[in-house]
Image: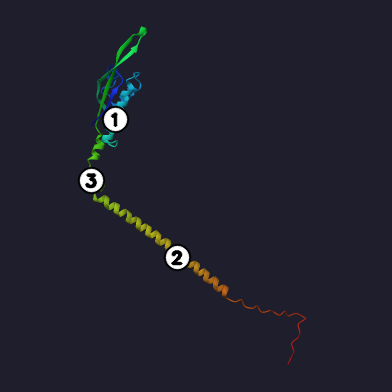
Amino acid sequence: MQATARIKYLMMSPRKLRRVVELIKGKSVEEALAILKYTTKAAALPLAKTIQSATANALSIEGTSHLKAEDLSISHIYIDEGPRAKRIRFRAMGRVYRYKHRFAHVTVVVAGEPREEVAKRRFLKRSDAADAAKPETGAATAETKAAPVKKEKTTAKKTAGKKSAAGKKAAAKKSGKGKAAVKKSKPSKPTAKKKSAGSHAAPKKKK
């Protein structure tokens, strides 16, 4: 997979650009950008921008999920001569010196291939993915089916025990309330006053 980026009519002579291009030919994108970052030449900045633009084009074409910037390298860099602009410089005693301002066209070609793991995933069929998701042997399915049944039984026993305990408590509460109500409803018997057999008691009359 290849992607290109180009700068046209760069206001710099091709000779100055070619000096810096020799440092980064055939390098990876990351290594080339690191070299240009610490190169004290005027041509380093436009070259770095062109390489970054070519890398962005490659990632947009292929997609960041299938291709990374680390996988790209610089395959070709072309420095073509552009038009020459005529300029003058004023000198002493009314003289004029003539010179030509040179332009250049820069073309960067970046190449790279997606990773193998990503490529396999990309061409994986839906049927293969479904087969891979299914369990391999029947024993595994039997174990998986048996496990939830055991859990259900244990949960059913627990729930039955809880219900029985709750029913016993409710019955005990009801029986307690009924006894209390019976006790409260019984009228209190009048207590008979005992006569004290004292000396001051009146004697009974004989018939």
Q: Does the CB distance between marks 2 and 1 fall below 8 Å?
A: no
Q: Which mark is residue 126?
A: 3
Amino acid identity at mark 3:
Arg
> How far separated are the C-alphas under marks 2 and 3?
55 Å
In screen coordinates, is 185 left or right of 39? right
Mark 2 or mark 1: name the one nearer the start of the chain: 1
Pointer 2 residue: 167
Instruction: Pick the quarter of the image with the N terminus.
Output: top left
Q: Which mark is residue 41?
A: none
Q: Which mark is residue 55?
A: 1
Q: At 35% from the left edge and 57% from the top edge, which residue is drawn? A: 152
In screen coordinates, is 85 left or right of 154? left
Amino acid identity at mark 1:
Thr
- Image height check: is 74 above or below 180? above
Identify which residue, 121 or 187, lies in the foreground. 121
- Image height check: is 154 above or below 174? above
User: Coloured how?
Assistant: rainbow
Instruction: Using a 10 Å C-alpha cutoff, classify the residue at mark 1 as few (fewer than 14 neighbours), some (14 to 19) or many (20 or more).
Output: many
Nearer the camera: disc 1 or disc 3: 1
Query: How many marks do you count on the picture?
Result: 3
> How far separated are the C-alphas under marks 2 and 1?
75 Å
Q: At 23% from the left edge and 38% from the top edge, which residue is drawn? A: 120
**Picture quadrant where residue 119 is located:** top left
Q: Name the spot of residue 96 as percent of width and height, x first.
A: 33, 10
Q: Name the spot of residue 137 as percent of width and height, x first.
A: 24, 49
Q: At 26% from the left edge and 20% from the top edge, which residue is drawn? A: 83
